[in-house]
Image (cartoon, rainbow, N blue to C red):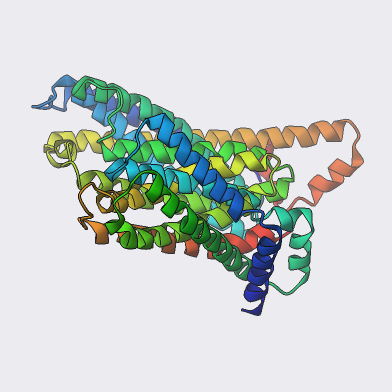
Amino acid sequence: MSFNAPRILPALTVLTLTAGFALVFFFAPNDADQGFIQKIFYLHVPIAICALVGFIVAAFQAIMHLRTGESSWDVRSYVSIHISVIFGVAVLITGSIWARASWGKWFVWDEPTLVSFLIVFLLYCTYYPLRYAIEDRERQARYASVFAVTAGAFVPLNFIAVRLAESLVHPRVFATAEGGLTPKMTVTFLVCLAGMALLWLTLARFELAAKSTRARLGRLRRALEGDEVAVGASRIAPVPRQAGEAG
Amino acid sequence: MTAFRAILAKDLRTELRTLESVPAMALFAATTFVLFRFGLDRTTLEGGLAAGVLLATVLFAAILAINRVFVAEREQGGFDVIRLAPVDGASLYAAKVCVLAIYLGALELIAVPVFAVLFAVEAGGLPALAAVLVLADIGLAAVGALVSSIAVNSRARDLIAPLLLLPLLVPVMIAAAGAAEPLLAAGGPSYADFGQWMGILALYDLVFIAVGYAVYDFLLED
């Protein structure tokens, strides 16, 4: 497995995110009902969408790992879940701020999207204790992939169940946030979404690069210490070493 | 199919001889009801509270069985024998799901009457409640067998299984409680939205049986 640090991606991310936030503050109009606080929507919703899509992506990467048996897919799946969990923390914090400002409470149990997200987040938090409770490397990767597939199937199901649970009792409180977007708001939202997706991708690529660099460092250190077995093992590694690895 | 029947028969026979799981679950459920009696300081329950107490108790009792369902396979070499024999993961998974569902059904045969007596629950809704519990049991068993075989091979298995199970079972809880609440309402059952909740439970069962069936072989490879 070898992943290089991205070069153009970070610049593109900074550019898109800056443009997105400039649009939020200077272009998008204030919401008629909620005023200025509604602008957190351009931060909160894109992060949430990226986190959820990231969980689904992790499930597909886990399927690829189970099908091919290549450990690089397991690393990809791990990194996707890792970045999405970090995004999840941001979602819960920004969501709480928004809820406090517009409903007066930090957490609102009537809001199905909020509750579903909390459950999904709690589920993915258990990925870490599960993964590190299994010692055998190969089995750890396999079980983690099984978890990622199961949890990936759980995400849409959970949203259906929670949404139904609430919509039977309460009308959708927040229909205006999605339904009542003016064209200016839509443009701003889409730019922010693209920026957040690029940020997710950049972070994931950097973590992959860091992981593969650390693995290579370990191999080199073992080689320096004259551990012939380790050198031999790295030569027959399943993924051939590439030229780019040196730089 | 023969493998499925053999594993199922083996597990049920072991349970009948050792009486390890179901009596413990039943005792646990009865004690939990008594705890709820004092914790809530209520002698009668109805509606949402009744549904919540019953389902939370069944769920926690299920965790006891789920923690144990693969312990014998691991400690007494069942996994090795199953890998040696021409048994595919799907048969083992199906057998374990059935075992868990049977345990849960047996538990509820004891726990629901105890619950109804202790809390003076209206009896009119109980037949429909049985249907809800059957679908909930299948969901618990499908997820439980999968999680249990993940957890049993990890270092902290008693810790990992409940940790993974509880968030995964939230939709079951939501749907079963939603269906059971009007059934246990004071003044006789009503069937508002009953079909919709049963639909969610059935969808959940199908999805997780399919997921378990698809991924189970990967848990056995070693």
Q: Nearer the viewer, residue B190 or B95?
A: B190
Please report the residue visible at 72 percent of the width from the left and 58 percent of the height from the top: B73
User: Which residue is at a point 47% across and 52% down the rendered structure image?
Assistant: B111
- Residue lying farthest bottom? B2
In this picture, is A62 found above or below A20?
A: below
Q: Is residue A43 left or right of residue B102?
A: left
Q: Relative to the observer, which residue lies in front, B217 or B80? A: B80
Q: Residue at the spot x=29%, y=35% of the render?
A: A45
In the rendered image, which quarter is residue A188 located in? top left
Q: Quick check: can you spot residue A156? A: no
Residue at the extreme left: A32
Vertical arrangement, residue A226 with respect to residue A148, above or below: above
Q: Residue at x 33, y 28 (%)?
A: A17
Front residue of A31 and A204: A31
Q: Quadrant of the C terminus of chain A?
A: top right
Give the number of marks: 0
- Name which quarter of the figure residue A111 lies in: top left
Describe residue A97's horizontal placement relative to residue B54 as left or right. Answer: left
Q: Which residue is nearer to you in this view: B113 or A17?
A: B113
State whether residue B39 appears in this view: yes
In x, y percent, where is residue B115? 41, 48
Dividing the picture into quadrants, the one containing residue A174 is top left
Task: Name the spot of residue A139 as percent of width and height, x first.
Answer: 70, 50
Q: Position of residue B25 (x, y in %)?
A: 56, 49
Residue A77: x %, y % from top left = 55, 46
In this rendering, would A179 be left or right of A73? Answer: left
